[in-house]
Image (cartoon, grey):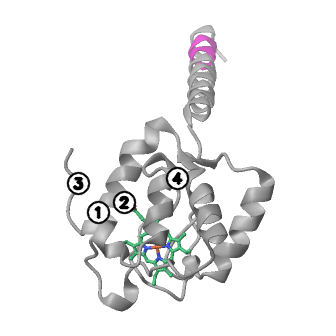
Amino acid sequence: MRKGEKAILLGITAFVVVVMAVKAWMVSQDKEKDPGIPFYSTASPELAREASVLYRKYKCRDCHALWGVRNIMQAVPAPSLDGMGSMRDEEWLYSYFSSENPQAILPSRLKPRFRMPSFAKIPEADRRKLAKYIASLKVEDWYLDEARKTAYEKLTGKDYRQ
Ligand code: HEC
């Protein structure tokens, strides 16, 4: 190999090494910036356990998604409950679940059989527990607008404008 060729080869090698290092650095930066899943709950393990029993008992999951999971046999366009506690407080939830006619509080755009049922007749303790648990389902601030938009569009079928 001639001297000039060696220098070119060395130059190319150095260039490739630098490009790879920069790429690896960028990937590691991206990872640090990935904010992860924005939903979390502030409920105690005990409340979470009890609420999940009620959630199944009253078939909330036939219509709603929670932790991104929904019953695949159902196609009701009900709002997801993830982050609901950042949009509604416990008292609001309690009166909504206690109302004989939830649509008087939140109008529905759906056919009657898909609408939010009244839970006025279930034991008060169950309504309190569900309200407390749903109020504990929070969304990180950086995702709050997005969660609001999704909930609004589910509820009204209209585009969300701030
Ligand atoms: C038959 C389907 C169905 C079932 C079962 C059901 N929901 Fe709903 N829910 C809805 C729909 C649809 C809405 C949106 C309002 C409407 O269209 O009536 C709603 C609204 C809500 C809201 C208010 C959402 C918002 O954007 O403010 C909460 C909270 C809620 N449901 C919680 C529950 C809980 C907890 C249960 C179980 C105890 C439950 N739902 C059971 C269909 C259902």
The type of residue carrying mark 3 is: Tyr
User: If the image is split into quadrants, where does the N terminus sit?
Assistant: top right
Q: Is residue 34 rendered to the left or right of residue 102?
A: right
First in sequence, mark 4 or 3: give its number: 4
Q: Which residue is mark 4?
A: 90
First in sequence, mark 2 or 4: give its number: 4
Could you tell me which secondary element the residue under label 3 belongs to? loop
Q: How many marks?
A: 4
Q: Is mark 4 within 8 Å of ligand 1?
A: no
Residue 118 image point, x, y percent: 45, 80
Could you tell me which secondary element the residue under label 4 belongs to? helix
Instruction: State the CA–CA distance, disc 4 to disc 1.
Output: 22 Å
User: Is the residue marked by circle 4 packed among few (<14), some (14-19), or many (20+) residues within 10 Å?
Assistant: some
Instruction: State the CA–CA distance, disc 4 to disc 3.
Output: 25 Å
Instruction: State the CA–CA distance, disc 2 to disc 1.
Output: 6 Å
Q: Which residue is mark 1?
A: 153
Residues at badges 3 and 1 in contact (C-beta under 8 Å)?
yes
User: Magenta stretch?
Assistant: 6-11
First in sequence, mark 3 or 2: give its number: 2
The type of residue carrying mark 1 is: Glu
Residues at badges 2 and 1 in contact (C-beta under 8 Å)?
yes
Q: Which residue is mark 3?
A: 160
Q: Which residue is mark 2?
A: 151
In the displayed structure, 85 sits above or below 33; it is: below
Residue 17 image point, x, y percent: 64, 22
Residue 105 image point, x, y percent: 32, 66
